[in-house]
Image (tube, rainbow, N blue to C red):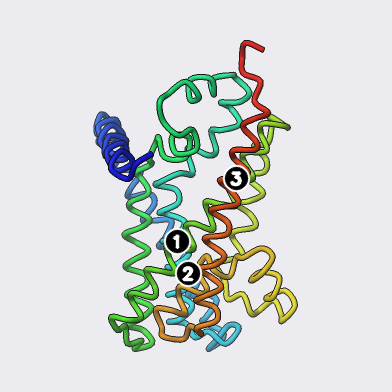
Amino acid sequence: MSARRVIRLLAVFVRTCLVKEMEFRGNFWMGVFANVIWVSAYLVFMKIIYANTKSVGGWTQGQGVVLLGTYVLTRSIVDIAFSRNLAELPNLVRMGTFDFVLVKPVNSQFFVSLRYMNFGEIGSALAAIAMIVYGARMDHIRITGSSLLAYVCMLACAICIFYGIYLMLMATAFWFVRVDNLWTLGETVFQVARVPINIFGVRATQILTFVVPLIFIAHVPAQALMSLLTPLLFVVGVAMSITLLVLSSLFWSFATRFYTSASS
């Protein structure tokens, strides 16, 4: 698809989802408020941890808050954009309604990934940004234009890595159909990214960098914002995100060949 058509379709998806959310405005705003409360609870938990220590894995309290805020921000963007869509994929395959996706004049991966957006998670995203600002002020972290640019770049890489891994997990539904538990498993594993990765030791850090790249979900973007990111990790992060996007797209094309449709 052309870039112009992608942008036009995304605009339609956003508009229709917003209209649907506004049909029940009270429910929408309550959801936003509830997400803000959840993020606030994370911050309280972080305060409890640092009440008895000055650092965790070499990360001070302010840095830890920036790390946690970055994880929540990444997770919120993922939840707004495509979590609901990918979580629904096994049901589409099981019920045979994936047929209706294939007959649409649009790329099936694009449609399955971004058709429905969860704007209730905006509360989490805004609270996460506030948490990041609070953590930076707590430790007097100086945020420069270059560090902010590197942060945005690494945040984009984190979202791509998140997406690539989740798409491949959910695409196994074309063989095993009932893979809903894989989503829960992924949720559990990704929780590791909330804490400084180096607390797990050198060997585990290497695995979480080059095998299961959880270090790029929050740890590396947070380092970028604090001007602590090494050029090597920056390059690896960009390469890892591109690789996972390409692999997930190839895996999607391969997996959809095994869909037998509801009429078979």
**Residue 182 x, y percent position in the rendering:** 67, 43
Disc nearer the start of the sequence (2/3):
2
User: Marks 3 and 1: which is nearer the front?
Assistant: 3
Q: Secondary structure at mark 2?
A: helix
Q: Quadrant of the C terminus?
A: top right
Is residue 146 visible in this depiction of the protein? yes
Report the side of 256 relative to 103 (left or right).
Answer: right
Report the side of 12 relative to 264 (left or right).
Answer: left
Q: Secondary structure at mark 1?
A: helix
The residue lying at 40 percent from left, 62 percent from top is 40
Residue type indicated by callout 1: Val
**Residue 227 x, y percent position in the rendering:** 41, 85
User: Marks 2 and 3: which is nearer the front?
Assistant: 3
Residue type indicated by callout 3: Leu
Q: Alpha carbon of mark 3 to alpha carbon of mark 1: how far? A: 29 Å
The residue lying at 52 percent from left, 60 percent from top is 242
Label 3 crowding class (10 Å Cα cut-off): few <14, some 14-19, many 20+? Answer: few
Label 1 crowding class (10 Å Cα cut-off): few <14, some 14-19, many 20+? Answer: many
Disc nearer the start of the sequence (3/1):
1
Q: Mark 3 and 1 residues: CB-CB less than 8 Å, in contact? A: no
Residue at mark 1: 72
- Against 236, is 105 above or below? above
The residue lying at 37 percent from left, 68 percent from top is 152
Q: Residue furthest top?
A: 263
On residue 250, the disc is: 3
Front-lying residue, 243 or 46? 243
Residue at mark 2: 68
Residue type indicated by callout 2: Leu
Q: Mark 1 and 2 residues: CB-CB less than 8 Å, in contact? A: yes
